[in-house]
Amino acid sequence: DQQVKQNSPSLSVQEGRISILNCDYTNSMFDYFLWYKKYPAEGPTFLISISSIKDKNEDGRFTVFLNKSAKHLSLHIVPSQPGDSAVYFCAASLYGGATNKLIFGTGTLLAVQP
Amino acid sequence: KAGVTQTPRYLIKTRGQQVTLSCSPISGHRSVSWYQQTPGQGLQFLFEYFSETQRNKGNFPGRFSGRQFSNSRSEMNVSTLELGDSALYLCASSPGTRGLSGYTFGSGTRLTVV
């Protein structure tokens, strides 16, 4: 049972435009969410997180939006750059992130075209 | 400071054999978590060790086991290998007090079972 879903396996965007990556979850107990970026042959690297007490968090070009009623979160990258091309994973956690167990989605491959 | 080190980087094993993977966490980190990444399944949580004790466990069969040593280095073992065990195995270390701050992944061990 996939509790965290990323329904788009891939996304292609032009350089300079906005990239929007989506993630849905089914477990209403999740209360802390994270986005990771992964290049081939490397481990995932942390991008941005959001607690369920917020609906938006920004860090530079990256913004995460959380819609608790829809059990949906999205990652916006503006403007997109070729170096952003990677696989993006969303992940969920319990207890406000006070646990080292993460539930990951299946990932979305983002390709930013120059 | 050195990152999370996983050895070996690549491994080829035959069905029925067993394998041991190693993870050296960031200096000072006491928690090590293990994940399996397969195409279409994303990252799936295997288990977490903290202070030589298993603190969290995922939904994997008993063929998957792990341990942690007093210097926080961790090993995971898979016995009676199956073709479906072919995957990228990732470990992540963190300071260990509950929370995801500092949660850092290694580059993984690519296991191929033939």
Image (tube, grey):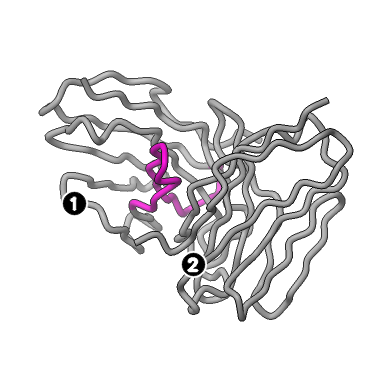
Q: Which mark is residue B61?
A: 1
Residue B110 relative to residue A33: left or right: left
* In the image: residue A56, left or right of residue A68: right
Q: CA distance from mark 2 to mark 1?
A: 22 Å
Task: Residue at 35% x, 33% y: name it.
Answer: B87
Where residue A76 appears, as percent x and y from the top left, is 77, 54
Tell me which residue sits at (66%, 38%) in the image.
A110
Instruction: Decide if residue A105 is on the left or right side of residue B111.
Output: right
Which of the two residues, A37 or B72, is positioned nearer the viewer here? A37
Q: Amino acid at mark 1?
A: Pro
The residue pinned by badge 2 equals A99
Q: Position of residue B24 (x, y in %)?
A: 45, 37
Q: Which residues are magenta?
A: B26-46
Question: Which residue is at a point 82% across and 40% down the rendered structure image?
Answer: A80
Q: Is residue A21 magenta?
A: no
- Local secondary structure at mark 1: loop
* Numbered badge on residue A9: none
Percent coordinates x, y for residue A11 in the rendering: 66, 40
Q: Nearer the viewer, residue A92 or A14?
A: A14
Q: For the residues tagged 2 and 1, is the chain the same?
A: no
Identified at 32% across, 58% down, the residue is B58
Quadrant of the rendered image containing residue A107: top right
- Is residue A89 found left or right of B42 in the rendered image? right
User: Where does the N terminus of chain B fall, quadrant-wise?
Assistant: top right
Element at badge 2? loop
Quarter occupied by the C terminus of chain B: top left
Amino acid type at circle 2 is Thr
Residues tagged 2 and 1 counted as in contact (Cβ below 8 A): no
